[in-house]
Amino acid sequence: MRHEAGAIELAHGSAYTAVVFTQAARADSRLPRADAVIGAAARAAVEELRGNEGT
């Protein structure tokens, strides 16, 4: 399992917490694909929030 959490603060002052949970078939300490999925999910969330600024 790999979990990450982060804070997102937008330019207009809104703040959010983003959390991504993953579960892998292997318990390796290095799982680049899982890390890439977490990063992609975080980026998509930030882009969505930025796209909704002012609405």
Image (cartoon, rainbow, N blue to C red):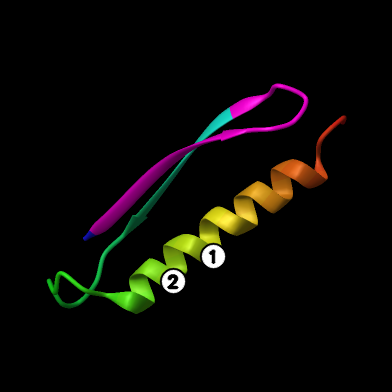
At 68% from the left and 24% from the top, the residue drawn is 14
| Label 1: element kind | helix
Q: Position of residue 11 (x, y in %)?
A: 75, 30
* 13, above or below 2, in the image: above
Foreground of the two, 23 or 17: 17
Q: Tell whether 30 sits left or right of 7.
A: left
Residue at mark 1: 40
Badge 1, how many Cα within 10 Å: few under 14, some, many 20+? Answer: few
Q: Position of residue 30 (x, y in %)?
A: 21, 73
At 26% from the left and 64% from the top, the residue drawn is 23
Label 1 close to label 2 by CB (< 8 Å): yes
Q: Tell whether 7 sits left or right of 28.
A: right
User: Between marks 1 and 2, how big is the CA–CA gap?
Assistant: 6 Å
Q: Which residues are magenta?
A: 2-15
At 35% from the left and 49% from the top, the residue drawn is 4
* 49, above or below 45, in the image: above
Q: Residue furthest front?
A: 11
Residue at mark 2: 36
Q: Position of residue 26 (x, y in %)?
A: 15, 77
Q: Tell whether 12 sits left or right of 19.
A: right
At 39% from the left and 42% from the top, the residue drawn is 5
- Kind of residue at disc 1: Ala
- Kind of residue at disc 2: Ala
* 36, above or below 18, in the image: below
Q: Tell whether 53 sits left or right of 21.
A: right
Queried whether the magenta region covers residue 10, the answer comes back as yes
Q: Position of residue 43 (x, y in %)?
A: 60, 57
Q: Residue furthest right?
A: 54
Quarter placement of the N terminus: bottom left
* 50, above or below 16, in the image: below
Which quadrant of the figure has residue 49? Answer: top right
